[in-house]
Amino acid sequence: MTKADIVAKISEKLGLEKGDVQATVETFMTEVKNSLETGDNVYLRGFGSFIVKTRAEKTGRNISKNTTIKIPAHNIPAFKPAKVFVEGVKINNEAK
């Protein structure tokens, strides 16, 4: 499902114009992104959490040059689904 598909479904279900729905969806995504960039997590009850995870420093290998490289510690965005969300997906996808 793409962002355009999400906008179309919401627009159809709520009877709103696609332009308004698209602006709302894009604003939501921008706010989540801005919150994560400033180090704040976003919690949506019943859906999940957008969090910032810290990856520890580690040693990697450059296989083309056969050398070791140091990968510094860094932060990455992550999504952790809510328990209700995970259970719903498990139940609805069991038969497939």
Image (cartoon, rainbow, N blue to C red):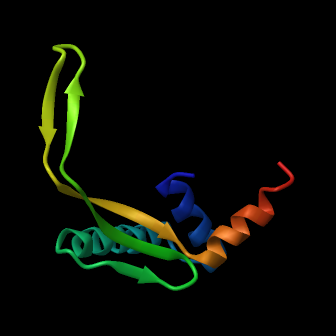
Say whether residue 23 is left or right of residue 44. Answer: left
Horizontally, is 11 left or right of 64 in the view? right
Give the residue drawn at x 40%, y 75%.
24
> To which quarter of the image does residue 54 belong?
bottom left
Q: Relative to 6, is 49 on the left or the right? A: left
**Among the 4 quarters of the image, the one containing residue 42:** bottom left
How many dots with numbers?
0
| Farthest right residue in view | 95
Q: Residue at x 56, y 76 (%)?
A: 82
Whole-percent x, y for residue 70 in the image: 12, 38
Question: Percent position (x, y) of residue 38?
Answer: 17, 74
Query: 61 and 49: which one is in front?
Result: 61
Name the spot of residue 63 as percent of width and height, x first.
24, 18
Q: Residue at horizontal 16%, vertical 54%? A: 73
Quick check: 67 above or below 43? above
Q: Is residue 32 above or below residue 68?
A: below
Judge whether 61 appears above or below 58 on screen: above
The extreme bottom residue here reads 45
Of residue 42 and residue 30, the one placed in the foreground of this image is 42
Measuring from the top left, give residue 26's x and y in whole percent: 36, 67
Residue 52 vs residue 34, the one in the foreground: 52
Horizontal arrangement in the rendering, residue 40 relative to residue 47 (left or right): left
